[in-house]
Amino acid sequence: MKVRPHSDMTGKRAAESPPPSVPSKRIVVPALLQDRLGTLVRLLSQKLACSLSWKEFVNDVRGKSYLSTSIDDIPHTARTYLQRLRDHGVRVQLDDPPWTPEQFSLNAARGAHPSAVVHRPFLRGEFADFIAAGFWVVLPLSQLRALPHTDLRLSPMAVKDEFNRRPRVIIDHTWFGVNGHSIAELPKEVMQFGGTLPRLLWLLRHANPAKGRIYLSKFDIDNGFYRLFLDADDALKLAALLPRYDGEEQLLAVPLSLTMGWANSPPTFCAATETAADLANANLYRQTVPPHRLEPLASVHNAWAPPPTGRPLSPPESTYPGDVSPDHATSCPTDASFDSTTPGPLPPSAPCPDAPAPVRASSGPPSPGRPPSPSEPATGRGPLPTVNH
């Protein structure tokens, strides 16, 4: 413990005495679980306590915008809007006054959606990944509520189950009125939904067969909504309540990007993607197009050719019984024939997938194959099984 010099100390003794200690900023360690998410929340809590402002904390956590600096040169009417999204983020403007302390406490007590409570283990791993990617921050509710000059709102968190896919996190911004009070910045016409399948079918139907085969490709932007940042000062208006965990205080997830559930997320996202589509479609009618910056990397795929059709020929003598001729038989790969170019390594004892089945003594049950067409005889085929719906 450092001792301050007595007031009677003068001269050399007072000069040699240590200066009085300045108390450091008090950091309250929250009660958190000892797992990956708990460790990340503790680090974020300490970082926020040492930051000069909430905006400085957010800009330091999420880094640079995903929108390119080349937006300044695009020939499109949405250029100014996209520049503002890149430099400042998406605004969250509400037409109602900030919540009263009583209203805030009442909404916080309701907690998350029941679907989020069921998926509590999933949410801990999911939000740990979101924090690492810079999409969200998770902090104690008490710490965020103590921030000065902020308009903190709450929304319950929900989880939607997906068929054969991982669950999807959804924020119900409608429950406490955030969606109802959100001021729309863009018209709904920016969302050009519908008509995709008829357009594709028309193009396929009227394609010139002399040009060869038709290839379709679909590109998906991974975590597309999370590529557009929110305005740092407005992000607290879209905060979401995590489910409660035993031994841990109430945590609040604050999005740093567009959320799945906010009314203005789809039109804002479409404003960016439809601009890219407009520019790409415009290039189709230009005589000369400047090379893309990724052209050298993409050009290596120009020599790609579709895999050959058909099956390899078998040895001259067929070892399979029945009416299979040697010209149509298939040889099975052996141990020596397997190399790095053989797709799908098979063990030596595995049967050849393309080989016809040997003739069995018993015919067994009738095959549920396709019904014979009117132009081919129906002899030699078993009756189709009856399916009871």
Image: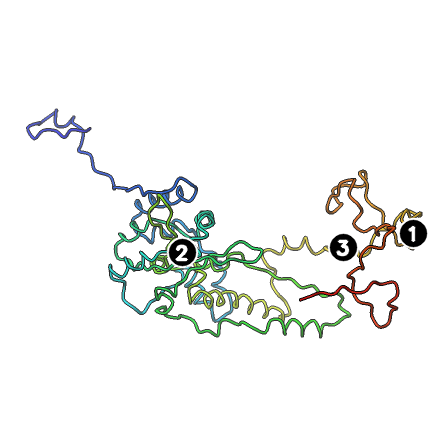
Q: CA distance from mark 2 to mark 3?
A: 45 Å
As drawn, is 351 to the left or to the right of 51? right
**Quadrant of the image containing the N terminus:** top left
Q: Residue drawn at (40%, 39%), measured in percent from left and top?
A: 34
Q: Which mark, by number, is residue 307? A: 3
Image location (x, y in percent) of residue 269? 48, 64
Point out the frontmost of discs 2 and 3.
2
Nearest the eye: 245 or 272: 245
Q: Residues within 10 Å of mark 1 (few under 14, many from 20)?
A: some
Q: Which of label 1 and label 3 is nearer to you? A: 1
Image location (x, y in percent) of residue 190: 49, 72
Q: Dot 2 corresponds to which residue?
A: 255
Percent coordinates x, y for residue 278 in the rendering? 55, 69
The secondary element bearing badge 1 is classed as loop
Residue 326 is tagged as 1
- Amino acid type, callout 3: Pro
Q: Badges 1 and 3: C-beta atoms under 8 Å apart?
A: no
Can you give x and y, in whole percent of width and height, for residue 95 in the image? Answer: 31, 69
* Amino acid at circle 1: Pro
The residue located at (60%, 71%) in the rendering is: 196
Q: Residues within 10 Å of mark 2 (few under 14, many from 20)?
A: many
Query: What's the distance in space between the residues labelled 1 and 2, CA to CA?
Result: 65 Å
The first of marks 1 and 3 along the sequence is 3
Q: Amino acid at mark 2?
A: Pro
Mark 2 and 3 residues: CB-CB less than 8 Å, in contact?
A: no
Numbered label tally: 3
* Sequence-first disc among 1 and 2: 2
- The quarter of the image holding the C terminus is bottom right
Q: Which circle's residue, 2 or 3, is located before the other in the chain?
A: 2
